[in-house]
Image: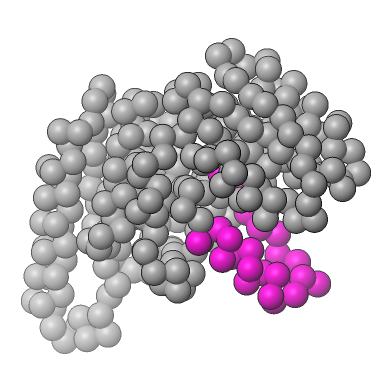
Amino acid sequence: MSNKLYNILVPVDFTSKNKWAITKAIEMANQMNCNIHLVNIVKPSLFSSFTPYESYVDRMNSYDQLKDLSVSYSNQLCGNGKIEISLLEGNPVTKLTEYIHDFEMDMVVMGLSNNLFQRMTSTVSVSKLAQMTNVPVLAVGSKGLVHHFKKIILPLYDELSLRRIRMAAALARSFRSTIYMITLRQGNTPEKILNEGMDIVSSIPSVSAQGFILEGKDLEKTTFDFAKRINGDLIMLNKPEENKFQGWWNKFTKKILSYGSEIPVMTMSKQ
């Protein structure tokens, strides 16, 4: 994965949550000089073959709404970035995955509903999309607009993810921010993992980082607690591991942590 972002995809469904996703994408595009792709997925109606005219009208209305969004936000873009629009029909996850691969998207920015239940039951799962596309997925709620990525929280797992560290460094360089690397003391070799991570970042010009070994039993919960304590602006996580021995309650609480966060969360696959 390149450290440079060229294309950011924002799935839109013409609800209020699109506003903060597009606004955050524009902020990133202005900092990193990249393009934004607004994509709306239309689910085919069961009766579309019997009412082709109504289906055609619905698609045209959606396309007109996409054009209106593009016009209303284009004047907020600086530099050489531009807004592209696309209207697709089919299964949302399948079509988004195809679009990401076909047009070489570098990141997805998804808006989250203010309702936690709606966030967790959304048609498009953040972690699933990150896994299927191998592209970072940034989830932003309405309160995420006040964050400007000045403090990037990067938990270090047992195996260092070079691409996640490089992505954090690319964002830190663009936003002139600081990376806060954290690991748990209860791990096998916390000092070694932290030192390796810090060494990687120190080799990248114009990037500032700090390292912390924290007390705790669960890295993700400790990460969210730490981010709140220092008023963090972005949390970068690996896609949660699917562990058949992990209780359903633990899986549920981890999902609440991620989807309920007021701080934007970026999910990346390990690959």
Q: Is residue 157 above or below residue 176?
A: below
> Residue 255 in magenta?
yes
Q: Is residue 183 above or below residue 208?
A: below
Residue 183 relative to residue 176: left or right: right
> Residue 43 in magenta?
no
Q: Residue furthest front?
A: 229
- Residue occupying the point 45% across, 39% down: 106
- Residue occupying the point 39% across, 69% down: 115
Instruction: Give the position of the N terminus as an image quadrant.
Output: top right
Residue 168 at x, y = what percent? 57, 32
Residue 132 at x, y = what percent? 55, 56
Residue 259 relative to residue 269: left or right: left
Q: Residue furthest right?
A: 188
- Residue occupying the point 35% across, 44% down: 145
- Residue occupying the point 46% across, 34% down: 149
Start-end of magenta stretch = 235-260
The answer, for residue 221, to whether it is visible in the render is yes
Q: Nearer the viewer, residue 184 or 100?
A: 184
